[in-house]
Amino acid sequence: MNSSSSNFNVSSNLNTGNQDGPGLAAAKYVIVLALGFILNYISGALIHTFRKHQVFFLNPRYVLLIHLVVNDMVQLTTSISLFISYVSYKINASVCCLMMTVAVFTTMNTPLNLAAMALERYVAVCFPLQHVELCTVKRTYVLIGCIWALSSVAVLFQTIVLLSTEPLSFFHSAIVCLMEKLFQHPISLQMRGITYIIYLTVVWFTLFFTYFKIFFAARAANSADGNATKARNTILLHGVQLLLCMLTYLDPLVKTHLIGSFPNISSHLRYVWYIIVDVLPRFISPIVYGLRDKTFKLYLRKSFKTLT
């Protein structure tokens, strides 16, 4: 998808060479690398905690969480790799295609995974008696498989079109790793538009339906449950995370209108857009589960004590 891939396509988002001096460009690189290191370190701690305690393997909520964390680690690492590749300006077309495919997969997975987590929380809050029966670990893994299958539709189609239309010499050439350099066929462009509309509609519908249902259910239980406020805050954090992730679908609109209207500061706008859409959403999961979830917080502290 053009909207998702172009966010992590650093050559497109961070055209630093045209407007930034060496000092400012270096500062941008350092900030991105530092944020990536911090986030991957935190995510690694969450994964380590999950692996060490069997209680998490038996809870579909945490299975979805760790899938999200691993997926975001891969996405962020690929994103930063594309960022660093901009230093050399051109990379092999085959390598670019591989990295772009991984980036598209993982970027598409994040909103779908959050939608799945929203559905799980909806069942847990609104149908607590049926939660154990409906949300099993086995069904959770099937759901994760469905997430990957849905994410693969657009990118596999575009890859097939690319392989069918480009000569073999293209894949041995060095190119600027831009989406438009890879998937430029009219059929690919049309497929991106269709996929964009479908995913936008499905994820937004899931967002509004589940979060409003949970919000009103938590408010209705406010008089009997003192944790209703915390539940509402968790819902809001999930909503913010999903909204930030879904900004990736608005990338073409932002580039066409906002960035296109201010060409003199386009590199700065692209940089800020990249941080907001690709980096910030991946800090929310550790906040929601590593700091606010009592169970995960308890075992996370034990893991840190063991490491120290």
Image (cartoon, rainbow, N blue to C red):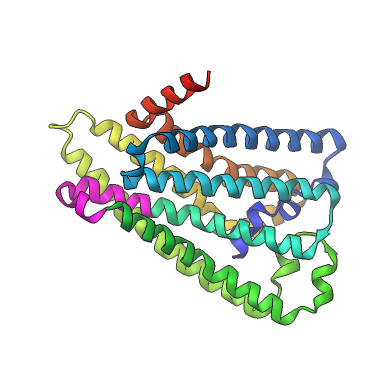
Name which quarter of the figure residue 33 lies in.
top right
Q: Is residue 19 left or right of residue 303?
A: right
Looking at the image, which is closer to me, 132 or 39? 132
Q: Can you see residue 253?
A: no
Q: Quadrant of the N terminus?
A: bottom right
Q: Position of residue 286 (x, y in %)?
A: 47, 35
In this picture, residue 259 sits left or right of residue 43: right
Q: Quadrant of residue 299?
A: top left
Q: Position of residue 268 (x, y in %)?
A: 72, 43
Residues in magenta, as a range: 116-135
Residue visible at 20% across and 49% down in the picture = 126
Across and down, in percent, residue 76 comes to 61, 45
Camera-side residue: 159 or 139? 139
Asked if the magenta segment contains residue 128, the reply would be yes
At a point 64% along the width and 34% down the height, the residue shown is: 37
Residues 281 and 208: in front is 281
**How far across and how far down the image is residue 31, in percent?**
70, 33
The reply, left or right, for residue 225 in relation to residue 201 is left
Residue at screen point 82% across, 72% down: 170
Q: How many marks?
A: 0
Is residue 30 shown above or below 61? above
Give the dominant element type of the magenta stretch: helix, strand or loop.
helix
The residue depicted at 62 percent of the width and 56 percent of the height is 103
In reply to whether residue 149 is colored magenta, the answer given is no
- The answer to whether residue 14 shows anywhere in this view is yes
Q: Is residue 92 above or below residue 190?
A: above
- Quadrant of residue 202 within the rendered picture: bottom left
